[in-house]
Image (cartoon, coloured by chain):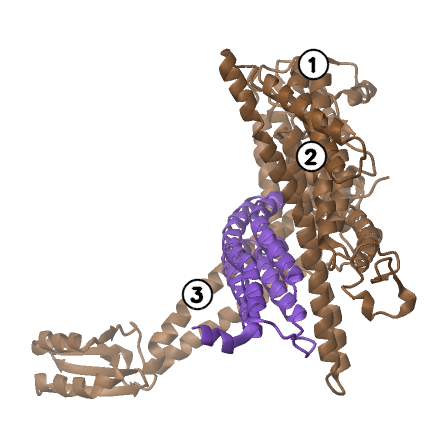
Amino acid sequence: MAIAPVQKIQLAVAKSHKKKFLELLQDFGSFQVDDFSEQLPSTDNEALKENQHAELNFANIEFAIKILTPHAKKRGLLEGPIVLSDEEIAEKAKNFDYDAIVKKCYEIEGQITTAKNELTAANNELATYKPWEKLKAGLQNLKGTKTTGVILGALKTQVAENAILEIENVSPLTSVEKVKEEAVNSYLIIVFDKEVEKDIRKTLSEFKFAETEAPAEHGPIKDYINKIEENIEKNESNLKKADEELKKLALHMDDLKAVHDYMGWQKEKIEAIQKFGNTQKVFIISGWIETKKRPQLEEALNNETNEFSIMEIQPDEGEAPPVIIKNSNFTSPFETLTFMYGLPKHDEMDPTPYLSIFFVVFFALCLTDAAYGIVLFACTALALKFMKMGDGMKRLVKLLMYCGITTAVIGAIFGGWFGLEAKNMPDFMTYTAANGEKMFFLQQINAVTNPLAVLILALGLGFLQIVVGVYMKFIHNFRHGSKKDAIMDTGTWAFMLTGIGFYILAAAGLLPGLAELAKWWVLIAAVGLILTQGRDKKNIIARLLSGVLSLYGLVGYMSDVLSYSRLLALGLATTIIGLAVNVITGLAGNLPYIGWIFAIVIFIGGHIFNLVINTLGSFIHAGRLQFVEFFSKFMEGGGKEFKPLTKKNKYVFIKNN
Amino acid sequence: MQEFFTQMGGPALAIAGAAVAVILGGIGSSIGVGLAGQAGAGVVTEQPEKFGKVLVLEALPGTQGIYGFLVGFLILLMTGILTGDMKDLSIAQGWQLFFACWPCGIACLFSGIHQGKVAAGGMNMVAKDESQMGKAMVLAAMVETYAVLGFLISALLVFFIKL
């Protein structure tokens, strides 16, 4: 329910137990290894080599998985991820010949690259020479002779006729032949007297003639083109073959993934070794552990050896302990939100249990549709039951399940059922309220005809949450810091806000006879604020002035409260989109004969759209109210996450024995 | 001028209002979703497995268009256009409905564009570290606040203007 106490400890273990000890620490999974290698740097290079080896191994398998993934069969949703026990994974890593697969992957990857490169080159060549297909002269003859030159090339078809005339005009000893004419380009071969080469080239450049180099081959160009085409075919079939081979290799995907995770563990361990301090016979580890778990660690070590010592040490100056938040099974899904914002500092409060109730209520107010709530609950409950998920995902889905429950309850109070209107519904589902309005069974308020009531409710809840936040800070500071400062800094504000709450209730006529008292309360609180908020100023006038200025803080609280009006807006948005879907459904239903098909599709599709988009919106906005309006009252955040040495898995779920 | 408005009548002004809300909100969201989508496409090119997260982030600036649509829809509903028996609105009522649409329209226009920019920035966060997704969403949601407020006022006005 709070931030768990941690302590920094130092362990000294005989070097002979290194392997066993590391395994033990990783299985224990609750010890964060800090860097101690600077004080006592390691002198053996073996660890370094081992590290490089582990990294290489890991990178190789990652590569193989990446290459094979597009060719592997996807696991079905119900089939779920791979589930194995620790031992099974280690077994796989030992017996499964992953090196062969990695090697093969590298080989095929090389082949694919070569084939692709050759293919690109061949395709380019083909594009260049294909237009010359009809050229009959042997390629060896296109080099010219002692006195004649040959130029091949293309120019724009629209200028081709002109160009041919002009080239022929240069000298009578010139011959131009159009080999091919396309819509855009025309391809010419020009044979000329070498003495006029300069003039010819000058004329050609005026027509933006693009010269083509003839390939250094013998025989007709047609043969050469055939050769290129054969080459393309060969490379294409090579690519296909490579793909098939990859597909075959991809059958081992599950095993590869298991080995990948196993190699990940090894890498983590070896990285931890780099952080150990070393003496000749002993290595020294410093790090953080949850205080409660220290006896467990000692016991585990004792079972292994007695050649170790363990003691608590002081953290370095300015070193903030890592933060572990602990919550009951019920509230732990809300840690999703706390992690989203970032952890509280080690000396702050864990906001998780406090935000839980507010979050689910606010979420429900944003969605306010009982039917959506039930759908959301059903989907998430089914997902939890039948799908394998990582811890983080599971927490999120569970959180949404809670939200579904509150949405169903609050939605029923607001009479939201797929955005349907009570006045159009059959009698057995509705009743007539005191003001004559027809309402759904269980419905108390109609947000569409009476949005003011909902607005007041939203602002009231917002005010409540903010007051709770201020009180939390007050109580926390009172317990853990200077009592005087706590009372003067935060206590005065808590007193003030409570007074304002009273005053508003009294002004609304809900507290008859207490109106006078409430007024005095607020006045006294204001005086208290003026007197206390400027304490750090030396000059008495400056002190009073900053005291008076501090009353401006009320504006801040007011704007925070007004921010909760979004609850009404988002709730209305859900209702009105639902209404719009229903109206359009009705219009579609009026179409003759096939109208009902459209109606069903529009009704289901529209409401799914509404549910998805507004669940997203509700989650974000209910979350924002916690982060921006609530957290800012009592915590700064920025705590360091506790990162113990564990077995992290990317693909495989560990079966607990 | 006066004659022009008299001829145009209340209902046309109300429809003009609905148009303002839907069009401005739609522009805001189109630009916003476009900005976010471009950035998102870049992320997906490199890391196709992040498509789901990118899609969610891209959808965030889409709500402004919905808010605009809702205000437009409310006008259609309240004036009875949808049910086929349109209420006989006076010119004054027409103007009231017309102006009631502006808070939502303008707020959604700008909020949509800027939320799109923040969402596009958030794409970079997701590209670097998937676990920062929540923070990226909250940052974008800050911009949406003002569209929500604009929508709230417009919706309340349309609800409560006496017809």
Please tell me the numbered disc located at residue A483. Answer: 1
Looking at the image, tell me whether mark 1 or mark 2 is earlier in sequence order: 2
Please tell me the numbered disc located at residue A457. Answer: none
Q: Position of A407 compared to B35: left or right?
A: right
Which residue does the image show at 21% across and 84% down from the upper left? A159
Q: Position of A506 compared to A218: left or right?
A: right
Mark 3–mark 1 contact, CB under 8 Å? Answer: no
Question: The chain coloured brown carries which letter?
Answer: A
| Tag 1 subunit | A
Query: What is chain B's hue in the picture?
Result: purple
Q: For the residue carrying disc 1, how many other residues have a C-alpha within 10 Å: few (<14), some (14-19), or many (20+)?
A: some
Mark 1–mark 2 contact, CB under 8 Å? Answer: no
The three-letter amino acid code for the residue at tag 1 is Lys
Look at the image and tell me in which quarter the C terminus of chain A lies.
top right
Residue mark closest to the camera, 3 vs 2: 2
Alpha carbon distance from label 3 to label 1? 79 Å
Q: Position of A149 compared to B131: left or right?
A: left
Please tell me the numbered disc located at residue A118. Answer: 3
Alpha carbon distance from label 3 to label 2? 68 Å
**In-front residue for pair A340/A83:** A340
Which residue does the image show at 25% across and 87% down from the upper left? A178
Q: Quick check: do tags 1 and 2 share a chain?
A: yes
Q: Position of residue A386 (x, y in %)?
A: 83, 54
Look at the image and tell me in which quarter the N terminus of chain A lies.
top right
* Mark 3 secondary-structure assignment: helix
